Amino acid sequence: ASMLYKFKSKNTGDVIMLEANGRRVLEVIGKDAGPKGIILPEQMPAAIAALEAAIKLEESQDPEEGGAPGDGLGLRQRAMPFIEMLQRNHKSGEEVVWGV
């Protein structure tokens, strides 16, 4: 069975990702993709910028070569709910935690 990453915060609904997607997002933002962790509000602007840069990079590559994985969704579609979560929590000063 594949693990799910569940990202939680006080003021937004949970964001749930398949293990491969959650791991990718955590690697992009420079976090160790362990079974649990925390993203502090002061780390969120850099995390958002890193994700947006990764999305731009992915979308600038030739789709024939490094095309979207099996589900046909690019990083943008999979990361948007997470980016919105970070933006909201940065504004309210709440941390985001994750677990599997």
Image: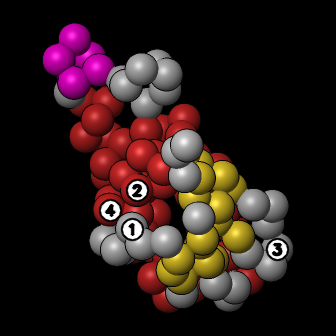
Q: Residue at x 22, y 24 (%)?
A: 66
At numbered mark 2, what does the secondary structure look like: helix, strand or loop? Answer: helix
Judged left or right of residue 60, residue 86 is: right
Among the 4 quarters of the image, the one containing residue 74: top left
Q: Are marks 4 and 2 in contact (CB under 8 Å)?
A: yes
Which of discs 3 and 2 lies nearer the camera? The answer is 2
Query: N-terminal of the two: label 1 or label 2?
Result: 2
At numbered mark 1, what does the secondary structure look like: helix, strand or loop? Answer: loop
Q: Residue at x 53, y 76 (%)?
A: 36
**Farthest top residue?**
64
Q: Residue at x 40, y 56 (%)?
A: 23
Write down the residue under mark 4. Answer: 27
Disc 4 to disc 2, how far (Cα)? Answer: 6 Å
Among the 4 quarters of the image, the one containing residue 98: bottom right
Q: Amino acid at mark 2?
A: Arg
- Crowding near the residue tagged with mark 1, few <14, some 14–19, many ≥20 C-alpha atoms within 10 Å: some
Q: Of residues 47 and 96, which is closer to you in this image?
A: 96
Q: Are marks 4 and 1 in contact (CB under 8 Å)?
A: yes
Q: Amino acid at mark 1?
A: Ala
Disc 4 to disc 3, how far (Cα)? Answer: 24 Å
In the displayed structure, 88 sits above or below 37; it is above
At numbered mark 3, what does the secondary structure look like: helix, strand or loop? Answer: loop
- Crowding near the residue tagged with mark 2, few <14, some 14–19, many ≥20 C-alpha atoms within 10 Å: some
Write down the residue under mark 1. Answer: 33
Magenta stretch encompasses residue 13: no
Write down the residue under mark 3. Answer: 11
In the displayed structure, 66 sits above or below 90; it is above
Q: Are marks 4 and 3 in contact (CB under 8 Å)?
A: no
Which of discs 4 and 1 lies nearer the camera? The answer is 1
Magenta stretch encompasses residue 65: yes
Write down the residue under mark 2. Answer: 23
Q: Amino acid at mark 4?
A: Glu
